[in-house]
Amino acid sequence: MKQFKELSFSEYFLSKQKLLEHAEDCPRIYSSYRVKSYRKVPLTEDYDSNEKIYISFKPNDVIKVLWEYENVHFPTARNVIIVSEDGSTQTYYPCWGSKKLLTWINTHAKEIEHDSAS
């Protein structure tokens, strides 16, 4: 069985600070997608709201999703930005879990670009 070193309080505190710093440095990436077919997705206008709004998409609509990569295999969706034909944007927050949203995107949209968020 593996033996762990007992830490002093100051060592514990420093290691906790390092973990918190690295947790804040997780990569955030905006990915843009082009919707392939007519679909609806439940979103909310406010992060803390439970009121779902079903947003309708038609083919060639563009959406941007801010993904936070706390886990390399399962990113977390932080927001969804809908880009209208005139270039204006509207930000919404996903009602679905990140895994379900990622599955929906992989099935009904095609990634067209991605860039890191500042």
Image (spheres, helix red, strand yellow):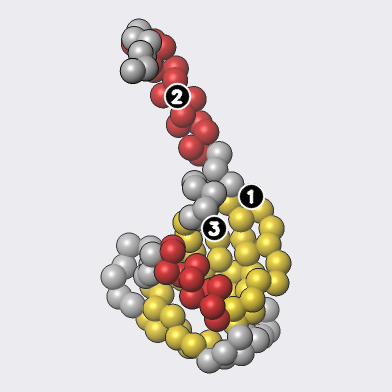
Residue 36 visible here: yes
Q: Residue at x 63, y 64 (%)?
A: 31
Q: CA distance from mark 2 to mark 1?
A: 22 Å
Residue nearer the viewer, 53 or 67: 67
In primary-sequence order, the first of circles 2 and 1 is: 2
Residue 91 visible here: no
Q: Position of residue 98 (x, y in %)?
A: 44, 63
Q: Position of residue 40 (x, y in %)?
A: 45, 86
Q: Is residue 13 above or below residue 83?
A: above
The residue that mark 1 highlights is 118
Q: Is residue 35 above or below residue 98?
A: below
Q: Which mark is residue 17?
A: 2
Q: Is residue 60 above or below residue 44?
A: below
Residue nearer the viewer, 89 or 59: 59
Q: Position of residue 92 (x, y in %)?
A: 46, 71
Near mark 2 (Cα within 10 A), the count class, few <14, some 14-19 or many ≥20, is few
Say whether marks 2 and 1 touch (CB < 8 Å). no
Q: Secondary structure at mark 1?
A: loop
Amino acid, disc 1:
Ser
Q: Which mark is residue 67?
A: 3
Q: Residue at x 41, y 12 (%)?
A: 11
Q: Secondary structure at mark 3?
A: strand
Q: Which mark is residue 107?
A: none
Q: Residue at x 33, y 77 (%)?
A: 52
Quadrant of the snapshot with the N terminus: top left
Q: CA distance from mark 3 to mark 2?
A: 24 Å
